Amino acid sequence: MKKSRVMHSFVVAALSLGGMSLGSPFSATAAAQQADVPAVPSPDLYAGSPYLRELRNSLVYGEVWERPYLSKRDRSLITIAVLQALTREELAIHIPRGLDNGLTPEEISEIILHVTFYAGWPTGVQASLTAAEAFEARGLTLGDLPRAPALEAEVTTPGGLSDAYAAVPRLGALRNSLLYGDVWERPLLSKRDRSLITVAVNQALYVTNELRLHIDRALDQNGVEPQELSEVVLHVTFYAGWPAAVNAGRLLTAAFEARGVALDELR
């Protein structure tokens, strides 16, 4: 019985955070009303931390999710990626929210595939099960999942990372043929999408060296704007925590300064 009550409380809390509501709504703040933020359900799960309830309405949904520098689709893209990487149960809420925000089932399938190579196979298995349940609940089935086109030239490992694979040469070969020669080339997600996902996941996992590399790739190769990367770091903060954001912010500052980005123009 106790376990049942705990699970019920989690479901209600997750629905509240994920954009759904159960029961009679409470009065929302003005900011929450303007952003069409879901009201906190009954029972009041924020009774033990009422300021958290206020910030949920006014800041997370009333401000961050409404900022114009990333679309709602992009925000769902990186939120799903981070929740998979961190194996959070809230993924069951944000996959349906992602569908509502314009992601297709095929794109969500591709997010799961991509994140698996940065966060590990178990996260992919769990996310795949969660996504299948979400699709079934909506009567959705996966359509075509096109594979990567054949590349004219072999992908090679950047020289700066050659020592990372010297002791594990098969891994270096797979990085070339599988990760960059296959997964990154699959057409359902753009290179921009994949950079947003990879930066978000590496921020969440506090993977400094890889994050530095993927900030550079995002800016120099995959068409991500400085303001968009700044927005990724801000958004992911509320799903992965402040310390990881500080680490990412330092790397982002260095990358922007190296490229002459006007920091005072960021919002």
Image (tube, rainbow, N blue to C red):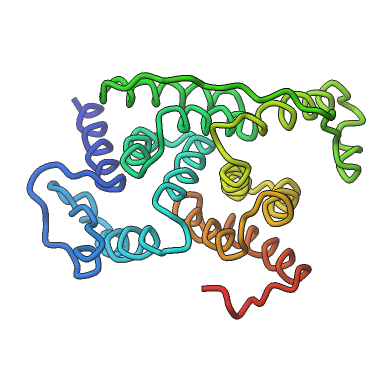
Q: Residue at x 26, y 25 (%)?
A: 138
Residue 16 in picture, x, y percent from top left: 25, 47
Q: How many marks?
A: 0
Q: Is residue 186 left or right of residue 258?
A: left
Q: Residue at x 62, y 46 (%)?
A: 195
Instruction: Look at the picture and state if 242 lies above or below 145.
Output: below
Q: Is residue 246 left or right of residue 237?
A: right
- Pick the residue in front: 9 or 261: 261
- Pick the residue in front: 51 or 155: 155
Q: Is residue 240 left or right of residue 205?
A: left
Instruction: Look at the picture and state if 128 lies above or below 102.
Output: above
Residue 187 in picture, x, y percent from top left: 59, 31
Q: Is residue 136 left or right of residue 42?
A: right
Q: Residue furthest bottom?
A: 264
Q: Quadrant of residue 30?
A: bottom left
- Pick the residue in front: 33 or 107: 107
Q: Residue furthest left?
A: 24
Q: Residue at x 58, y 40 (%)?
A: 190
Residue 210 in picture, x, y percent from top left: 73, 46
Q: Quadrant of residue 66?
A: bottom left
Q: Quadrant of residue 56?
A: bottom left
- Pick the residue in front: 134 or 265: 265
Quadrant location, the N terminus: top left
Residue 253 in picture, x, y percent from top left: 68, 68
Q: Residue at x 53, y 25 (%)?
A: 124
